[in-house]
Image: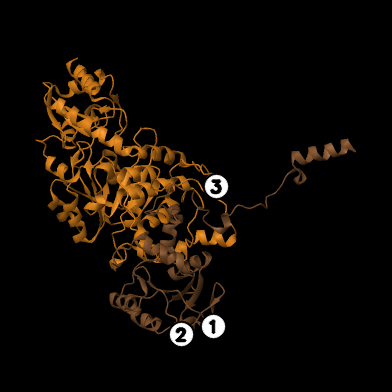
Chain colours: A orange, B brown
Amino acid sequence: MTDRLPGFSTLAVHAGAQPDPTTGARATPIYQTTSFVFNDADHAASLFGLQAFGNIYTRIGNPTNAVLEERVAALEGGTAALAVASGHAAQLVVLQQLLRPGDEIIAARKLYGGSINQFTHAFKAFGWNVAWADPDDVASFEQAVTPHTKAIFIESIANPAGSITDIEAIAAVARKAGVPLIVDNTLASPYLIKPIDHGADIVVHSLTKFLGGHGNSLGGIIVDAGTFDWSKDNKYPMLSEPRPEYHGIRIQETFGNFAFAIACRVLGLRDLGPALSPFNAFMILTGIETLPLRMQKHCDNAKAVAEFLSTHPAVSAVNYAGLPGDKYNALQRKYAPKGAGAVFTFSLKGGYDAGVNLVSNLKLFSHLANVGDTRSLVIHPASTTHSQLDDAAKVKSGAAPEVVRLSIGIEDKEDLIADLDQALRA
Amino acid sequence: MNHDAYDDNYIRSILNNVKTIAMVGASPVNVRPSYFAFKYLAQRGYDMIPVNPGHVGKALMGKPFVASLADIDRPIDMIDIFRNSSHIMPVVEEALKLSPLPKVIWMQLGARDDAAAEKAEAAGLKVVMNRCPKIEYGRLSSEISWMGVNSRTLSSKRAPIPTQGMRLSLNRTSFGGGQTAASDRAAKNKTETT
């Protein structure tokens, strides 16, 4: 008998979880504990020496978090995963394994603003340099490759305008350069796009968004595709060289195709410390069980709202890859045929003032700086997140005065359209 | 036999049925992957035999090293080869001279020799290449899930108690001299009736 391959919705409910061995509890228990007892001195030594699988301390691993890790690894088609405190923590831990001072990462110019800040300022202080490339121009990635390049970083669906990235084309650049491709899959979720199928070596998420889905818990995760050979040319010594803190173990040699996830755990999370609370892991796990249902509804609602806006007299343009005339529509049909996601921007004929008015007149949409919530969200970047920039800089960063960003929730689409209509007319 | 991907049931039946495992290339150095795998498999109840001519006279977890497969005094179910791909063929040729024949040739993560595999399969042996029995055991038992690894298995049954150390014990510390409230009442009743 051959094992049947479970479908995505089955994995979303079951992967990683099993009734508790002691109590039989069916839902995953919240193991709200800092530490775990050892059986004896040899067991303790085996765990600390990475010889045995098991729990030591929640900063290194926790059974509730482990269920979340296996579930996301299964949904993404990876070999293993590591949950951390936030999406930013995931990026920090990943790059700590790959970069030394003086090394470089090539990143897509279109990224979540928080990632642009992290790469530009915080990582600069570590001596990690970033070279920006245009995700709409694959050649710009190729041109940015230098002998110091250690990784390429892109978003599958890019913030803020919901543009779709040609993952396969950029994966080919990474392969040629001999560096891993890191894909932030936050805005797509594995329900819409599985970057590993398109050549990603590492996938990161802010679990805070669609995976958790309810706007109640921060979290981040790193998924190891198991595809990259870390031992080649000694380019990644954290994985290929004997580790002094583990008596000379070589991580890749010992852990094979999930070595990167182990390195992130035992060298990154252990020493940098951004552990995920088991309570947050539980909340996010509960969210993931309904990911396929929610994500489809998010996408269907977003498409209906985008269609409505595209014919509205107060609106000058809508950037939504799910619309037939959109610049990214062909890429959307290739990479995300089930839907174009639920985060997009549109422009108002009335400019800056119209943006400010719209936000204040909306009654159902919440004005805040998150995306991927059950609730519909709105932000006018020019008067909020990008208000410190001059007009030219606003336009360059996709936050022109007339631009409004929406994250469409799972309410009834008729109510969302009615709310936008009244706010645009007010 | 497709050696690029194995059905879980193939691996499962091997790990369920073998008892004696000779590990060729076992190392007594406790940071080597072979040491990790040897110790783990020994703790799961397999009869492990370390084979390494460089360490004869020493022991690994109390099991004496032997120089070669021919020096093993009992039938072997499986040979786990911790050598580079280029050193696999001589081990397989030696294995095929044993009587009785072993049932399984297992080549470690990173090791693969298709010609050697073909030879072993022609003699009726099962072959696994480029896998680690510790990882596969941990995966199929879902013990490896504690490390966030994708076990690629699902179960709605209560998880098995994973290690001997976690077996429920009766040897707990008792309070109040070990007497229960019921025994208190029984003792009191006894006093009253006499």
Q: Is residue B111 above or below residue A79?
A: below
Estimate how packed mark 2 is, as few (under 14), some (14 to 19) or many (20 or more) residues with alpha carbons within 10 Å: few
Mark number, residue A22:
3
In the drawing, does residue A42 fall left or right of residue B54?
right
The residue singled out by tag 2 in the image is B70
> Same chain for the residues at labels 3 and 2, yes or no?
no
Q: Residue furthest top?
A: A426
Give the distance between the C-alpha atoms of the residues marked 3 and 2, in whole angstroms: 45 Å
A209 with respect to A267 (left or right): left
Question: Share a chain, discs 3 and 1?
Answer: no
Q: Are marks 1 and 2 on the same chain?
A: yes
The residue indicated by pointer 1 is B57
Q: Residue A353: horizontal and vertical position, in percent?
A: 18, 21
As drawn, which residue projects farthest toward the right? Answer: B194
Name the residue: 57% across, 52% down: A37
Judging depth in this view, the residue of B194 and A267 nearest the camera is: B194
* Quarter of the picture holding the N terminus of chain B: bottom left
Question: Whole-percent x and y of residue A70?
Answer: 39, 49
Q: How many marks?
A: 3
Question: Does residue B81 show up?
Answer: no
Can residue A169 be seen by looking at this rendering?
Answer: yes
**Disc 2 marks which amino acid?**
Ala
